[in-house]
C-alpha cells in the first residue's frame, strides 16, 4: 500500500519540470538548481578574484611603481584573498555538496530546501556589498584578508563597516548551508547506506560542515568585536583601553585555521572519488581515510597558535602548538600514502579529472612539505610573513581546493549536463594550468627564503628576476582558465543532444552513476536499494 | 621575448640545482651571522632533506605506478583495498620522523627564549612607517627612515644598489656582544625582521616583546618590516651595522649621552639656546629637502596627496589658513591616522622649514597672501607653539 503511494508521488514530480524564466532561479528549492547557482556564482567570482591577482602580479613585474599606487595594491591583495576564500572556494564546495550529496546518498533533495535557497541568495548580496567598497570615496578594505587589528579598527578605512556586514552575511550563509548538509546526511541516507558505506566525498563534507558550525560563529564574534571597537568605544583590541591586539589574532585564527581544512576536506573527498574511478580499483584503506579526516578536523581546531609564533607567545605555548601542528602531518600523510596505494597496481587511464587529481596529489604534497617546515617554530621565525608563506598556502589552496574543484567539475559535468567535454581542450587546460601555477608559485619559495616580505607593492633589486617569472606564470595560469570557461559553457548550453551513458566513466561506482545523464530534475523520489559493497570493484 | 626564454631556462636549471645541491645566495635562507640564525639554517636544511627523502619515496612509487599500471599497457586492476600492517607502518614511521625533527627544534627554541646576560639593550619601536631605536643604557635615541629618494620609486631616476633597503640612520651594534631587543609599536602592528640575524619579532602596540642576537661578523645587514602596517609597509627597511667594539665605543661617544643628531633628525632637547633667524631661502631649501624625505610618501611630491586617506596640501584649508592650526597638527599629529606627532621627531628649525615650504609651494603662497596668513615661519615660532 505505502509503496504505491510513494510511486504515485514520484510520477507526479516527473510531470512538472522547472519553472520558466528568472523566477526558476530566484525561488528554486531544487538542490540541483541551487548547486548550479553556487557553481556559477563561484565561477564569476573566480574571474573577479583572478583579475585582482593579475593586477597585483603586474605591479610586481619590476621594482618601482609600475601600474598602481601602494594604497590600491593593498586593496587588491585584500579583496583577492577575501574573494578567493569566501567567494570562490567555499561556494564551489557548497555547490558540489548540493548537487552531489543527495545523488550520492540516494535522497530526493536536501533536508531543508527553503533554507537552502536563502543560504545561496545571501551570497550575491554579501559580495555586492563587499565589492561596492571599491567604488566608494576612500579606500576599500586594505588591511589584508586577515584584517589584523588595530590596522582594521582604529586605522581602518570607513568602508570597513561594509566589509564587516558582508562577512556577517557570508557567515550566516555558510552556517545555514552546513546545518542543512548535516541534517541531510544524518536523516536522508537511503535505507541500507550505513556510515561505513558512505561515499568519502560525503564523509569529507560531513566533517567540514561540523567544522563550519564550530568556527563560523567565532568569526562573526570577531568582526562584531571590531564593530564595537570602531563605533561603540569598547577596547577589545586596543591596548590604550586595556585591550590586546593579539587577542584579535587568537580569535581570528581560531576561525582561520579550521577554515583552511574547511577549504580542503571536501577536496580530499573529491579526490577519493576520482582516483579509484580512473584506477579501476577500490579506494585503499577506506576506514583509515575516514578516521584520518576526522582526526585532521579535530587537530585543526587546536593549532591556531602556529599562525602567531612571532607575536611573543611564551615558550610553553609555542612548544604545544608546534607539536600539535606537526602531528597533523601524520593523518595527512596517511591520506597521501593511501591515494598512492590506490593507484598502485590499478588499471590507470588519464582523463582530465584524473590529471587534475594527480596534479593535486603532487603539488599538495609539496605544499604539505613546506607546511611541515613552517611548523618548526625556530624556522618559522624566518619564514613567517615572507613569500615562503605565500608559496606554501597557494600550493595547498590552489592544488588542494581549486584543482579538486576543477577535477570535480570535469568528473561530474557530463552527468550534470548530459554533454561530454572536449578531452583535448581539457588536457590543454590542465597542462597550461599546471605549468602556469608552478611558474607562479615555485619561485615564491626562493623569494621568501631570500627575505622578501609578503604584501609589498615594491621590492629591492635582488628580487627582480624571480618576481618576473611569477608574473609571467600568473598570466599563463590566469588566461588558461578562459579555456575552462569555454568548456563549461559549451557543455551546459550545447544545443545538440548529448550521447552520454548513465555510467559516463568506465570505472565509476556509486549511486549517482545509476541515474541517466543528464540527471532528471527530480531523482530518487523512491529510495534506491543499497546492497553492501555496492561501491566495491 | 628572447630575454624571457633565456631567463626561464636559467630559472628551471637553478631550480633543479637548488633542489639537488645546497644554498646559492638569493635562493635559500641565508646562513646568517648569529648562532641562532646558523641553528635555524641547519634545522631548515635538515627538514628540507627529510622532505626530499619522503618526496622521493612517494613520487617514486607514484611515477612507477603511473608508467607500469596504465590501462593502455593492458594492466588489470588488483583487488586489494586494505592492509592493516602497511597502514600502521605509514602511521608510525612518520610519527618517529616528526619526533626526530621536534627534538632539535625544541632545543633551538629554548635557546631563542633565553634573553639573559645581554651586553646591550635596544628598544625598537615601530611607527607608520619608520623605526625608532633607543639605546637604554647609553641614552641614545633616534628615528630611522627610508633614505631611497622618491624619484627612484617613481622611476624618474636610476635605482641605487640598495634600493628600498637603505636608511638614514642605521642601528649600530658591537660585534660578539649579546644585544637584547625590546620590540614594541606606537600605532599598528609592525615586525622587525633581519634574516641574517635570525630575528623576526612582532612589534605590537602596548606590549613589549623580547628577542636577541649575537652577531659574530662585522658588516651591514638589511631587513624589512614583516607585518602589513598600512600603505607604506614596503618602505620602512631596517639596516643594522655590526662594528668592532672599539668602533662602537667611538660611535657612542660621538653621539654623546644626548639624543642622536643626524641630518635634521634632532629632537627638541637640543634647542637649549634660541636659534638664529633664518632667511626664507634657507628655510625653503631645508624645508623642501625634509618634505620630500618625511612627508612626500603620503602627501606626495606634488602636494596632491592620495585623498581621502592622505589629504592634498595644495590649496588645503590647514596649510592656507591660520598658522596655529598647522603648527598644532604637525607638532601633535592626529590620532588614529598616519599623521604623527612630528614634534617628537623633528627640531624647531626643521619644523619651521617644512611648514614654510608647505605654505609656499604649489601655489599656496598666493592663497596665503590673499587671505593675509603668514607664509614664512621662524624656529622661535615653533618653540612658542610647543608651549
Image: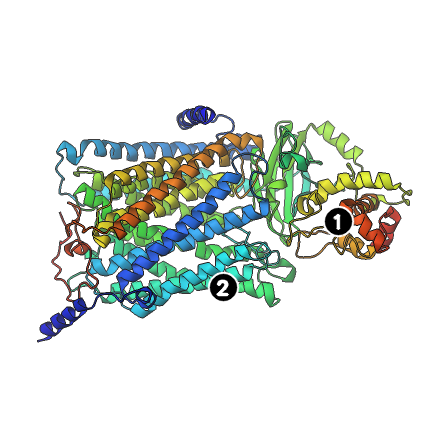
Residue name at image x 35 percent, y 48 percent: A401
Q: Which residue of the protein is positioned furthest toward the left in this rendering? A: A1
Q: Which residue of the protein is positioned furthest toward the front in this rendering? A: A495
Nearer to the camera, A170 or A241: A170
* Mark 1 nearby-residue class (10 Å; few <14, some 14–19, many ≥20): some
x, y percent for residue B273: 90, 44
Nearer to the camera, A487 or A257: A487
> Quick one: quadrant of the C terminus of chain B?
bottom right
Nearer to the camera, A418 or A319: A418
Chain containing the residue with disc 2: A
> Residue B373 vs residue A201: left or right?
right
Q: Quadrant of residue A196?
A: bottom left
Chain containing the residue with disc 1: B
> Quick one: quadrant of the N terminus of chain B?
top left
Nearer to the camera, A359 or B45: A359
Which label belongs to residue B106? none
* Mark 2 nearby-residue class (10 Å; few <14, some 14–19, many ≥20): some
x, y percent for residue B74: 12, 33
Q: Are marks 1 and 2 in contact (CB under 8 Å)?
A: no
Q: Secondary structure at mark 1?
A: helix
x, y percent for residue A257: 43, 52
Residue name at image x 16 percent, y 49 percent: A499
Q: Secondary structure at mark 2?
A: helix
- Give the answer, above or below, for where B287 lies relative to A109: above
Which label belongs to residue A165? 2
Measured in 3D between alpha carbons, the distance from the residue under mark 1 to the one under mark 2, in whole angstroms, is 36 Å
Q: Which residue is mark 1?
A: B342
Amino acid at each position: 500500500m505505502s509503496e504505491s503511494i510513494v510511486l504515485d508521488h514520484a510520477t507526479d514530480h516527473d510531470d512538472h519540470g522547472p519553472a520558466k524564466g528568472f523566477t526558476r532561479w530566484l525561488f528554486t528549492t531544487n538542490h540541483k538548481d541551487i548547486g548550479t547557482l553556487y557553481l556559477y556564482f563561484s565561477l564569476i567570482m573566480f574571474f573577479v578574484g583572478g583579475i585582482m591577482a593579475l593586477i597585483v602580479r603586474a605591479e610586481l613585474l619590476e621594482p618601482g611603481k609600475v601600474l598602481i599606487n601602494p594604497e590600491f595594491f593593498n586593496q587588491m591583495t585584500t579583496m583577492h584573498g577575501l574573494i578567493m576564500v569566501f567567494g570562490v572556494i567555499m561556494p564551489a564546495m557548497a555547490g558540489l555538496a548540493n548537487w552531489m550529496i543527495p545523488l550520492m546518498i540516494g535522497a530526493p533533495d536536501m533536508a531543508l530546501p527553503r533554507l537552502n535557497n536563502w543560504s545561496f541568495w545571501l551570497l550575491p548580496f554579501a559580495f555586492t556589498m563587499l565589492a561596492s567598497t571599491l567604488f566608494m570615496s576612500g579606500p576599500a578594505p586594505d588591511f589584508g584578508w586577515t584584517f589584523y587589528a588595530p590596522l582594521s579598527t582604529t586605522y581602518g578605512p570607513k568602508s570597513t563597516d561594509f566589509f564587516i556586514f558582508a562577512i556577517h552575511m557570508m557567515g550566516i550563509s555558510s552556517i545555514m548551508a552546513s546545518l542543512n548538509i548535516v541534517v541531510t546526511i544524518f536523516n536522508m541516507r537511503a535505507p541500507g547506506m550505513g556510515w561505513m558505506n558512505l561515499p568519502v566525498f560525503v564523509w569529507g563534507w560531513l566533517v567540514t560542515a561540523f567544522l563550519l558550525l564550530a568556527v563560523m560563529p567565532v568569526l562573526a564574534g570577531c568582526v562584531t568585536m571590531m564593530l564595537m571597537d570602531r563605533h561603540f568605544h569598547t577596547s577589545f583590541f586596543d591596548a590604550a583601553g586595556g585591550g590586546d591586539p593579539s587577542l584579535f589574532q587568537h580569535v581570528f585564527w581560531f576561525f582561520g585555521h579550521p577554515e583552511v581544512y574547511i577549504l580542503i576536506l571536501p577536496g580530499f573527498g573529491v579526490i577519493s572519488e576520482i582516483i579509484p574511478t580512473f584506477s579501476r580499483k577500490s579506494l585503499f584503506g577506506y576506514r583509515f581515510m575516514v578516521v584520518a579526516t576526522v582526526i585532521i578536523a579535530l587537530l585543526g581546531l587546536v593549532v591556531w597558535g602556529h599562525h602567531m609564533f612571532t607575536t611573543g607567545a611564551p615558550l610553553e605555548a609555542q612548544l604545544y602548538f608546534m607539536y600539535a601542528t606537526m602531528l597533523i602531518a601524520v593523518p595527512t600523510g596517511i591520506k597521501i600514502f593511501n591515494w598512492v596505494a590506490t593507484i598502485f597496481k590499478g588499471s590507470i587511464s588519464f582523463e582530465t579529472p584524473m590529471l587534475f587529481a594527480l596534479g593535486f596529489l603532487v603539488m599538495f604534497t609539496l605544499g604539505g612539505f613546506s607546511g611541515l617546515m613552517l611548523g618548526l617554530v625556530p624556522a618559522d621565525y624566518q619564514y613567517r610573513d615572507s613569500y615562503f608563506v605565500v608559496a606554501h598556502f597557494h600550493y595547498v589552496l590552489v592544488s588542494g581546493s581549486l584543482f579538486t574543484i576543477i577535477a570535480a567539475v570535469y568528473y561530474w559535468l557530463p552527468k550534470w549536463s548530459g554533454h561530454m567535454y572536449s578531452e583535448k581542450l581539457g588536457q590543454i587546460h590542465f597542462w597550461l594550468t599546471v605549468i602556469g601555477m608552478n611558474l607562479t608559485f615555485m619561485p615564491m619559495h626562493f623569494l621568501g627564503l631570500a627575505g622578501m616580505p609578503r604584501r609589498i607593492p615594491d621590492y629591492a633589486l635582488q628580487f627582480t628576476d624571480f618576481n618576473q617569472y611569477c608574473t609571467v606564470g600568473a598570466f599563463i595560469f590566469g588566461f588558461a582558465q578562459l579555456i575552462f570557461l569555454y568548456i563549461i559553457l559549451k557543455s551546459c548550453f550545447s544545443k545538440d543532444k548529448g550521447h552520454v551513458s548513465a555510467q559516463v566513466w568506465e570505472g565509476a561506482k556509486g549511486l549517482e552513476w545509476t541515474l541517466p545523464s543528464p540527471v532528471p530534475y527530480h531523482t530518487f523520489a523512491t529510495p534506491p536499494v543499497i546492497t553492501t559493497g555496492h561501491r566495491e570493484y | 621575448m628572447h630575454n624571457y626564454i633565456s631567463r626561464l631556462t636559467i630559472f628551471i636549471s637553478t631550480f633543479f640545482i637548488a633542489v639537488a645541491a645546497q644554498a646559492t645566495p638569493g635562493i635559500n635562507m641565508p646562513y646568517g651571522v648569529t648562532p641562532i640564525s646558523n641553528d635555524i639554517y641547519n634545522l631548515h636544511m635538515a627538514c628540507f632533506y627529510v622532505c626530499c627523502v619522503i618526496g622521493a619515496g612517494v613520487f617514486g612509487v607514484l611515477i612507477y605506478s603511473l608508467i607500469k599500471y596504465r590501462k593502455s599497457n593492458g594492466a588489470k586492476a588488483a583487488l586489494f583495498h586494505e592492509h592493516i600492517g602497511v597502514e600502521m607502518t605509514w602511521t608510525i614511521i612518520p610519527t618517529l620522523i616528526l619526533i626526530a625533527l621536534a627534538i632539535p627544534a625544541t632545543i633551538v627554541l629554548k635557546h631563542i627564549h633565553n634573553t639573559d646576560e645581554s651586553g646591550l639593550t635596544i628598544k625598537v619601536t615601530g611607527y607608520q612607517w619608520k623605526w625608532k631605536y633607543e639605546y637604554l643604557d647609553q641614552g641614545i635615541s633616534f628615528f630611522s627612515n627610508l633614505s631611497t629618494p622618491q624619484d627612484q620609486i617613481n622611476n624618474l631616476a636610476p635605482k641605487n644598489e640598495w634600493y628600498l633597503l637603505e636608511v638614514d640612520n642605521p642601528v649600530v651594534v658591537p660585534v660578539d656582544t649579546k644585544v637584547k631587543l625590546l620590540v614594541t609599536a606606537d600605532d599598528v602592528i609592525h615586525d622587525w625582521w633581519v634574516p641574517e640575524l635570525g630575528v623576526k619579532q612582532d612589534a605590537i602596540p602596548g606590549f613589549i616583546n623580547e628577542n636577541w642576537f649575537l652577531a659574530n661578523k662585522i658588516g651591514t645587514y638589511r631587513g624589512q618590516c614583516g607585518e602589513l602596517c598600512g600603505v607604506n609597509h614596503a618602505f620602512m627597511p631596517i639596516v643594522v651595522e655590526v662594528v668592532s667594539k672599539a668602533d662602537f665605543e667611538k660611535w657612542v661617544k660621538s653621539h654623546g649621552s644626548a639624543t642622536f643628531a643626524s641630518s635634521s633628525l634632532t629632537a627638541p632637547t637640543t634647542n637649549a639656546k634660541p636659534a638664529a633667524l633664518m632667511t626664507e631661502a634657507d628655510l625653503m631649501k631645508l624645508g623642501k629637502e625634509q618634505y620630500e624625505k618625511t612627508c612626500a610618501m603620503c602627501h606626495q611630491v606634488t602636494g596632491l596627496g592620495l585623498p581621502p586617506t592622505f589629504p592634498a596640501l595644495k590649496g588645503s584649508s590647514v596649510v592656507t589658513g591660520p598658522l596655529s592650526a598647522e603648527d598644532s597638527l604637525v607638532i601633535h599629529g592626529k590620532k588614529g591616522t598616519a599623521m604623527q606627532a612630528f614634534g617628537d621627531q623633528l627640531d624647531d628649525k626643521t619644523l619651521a622649514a617644512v611648514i614654510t615650504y608647505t605654505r609656499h609651494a604649489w601655489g599656496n603662497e598666493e592663497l596665503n597672501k590673499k587671505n593675509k596668513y603668514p607664509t614664512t615661519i621662524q624656529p622661535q615660532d615653533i618653540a612658542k607653539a610647543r608651549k
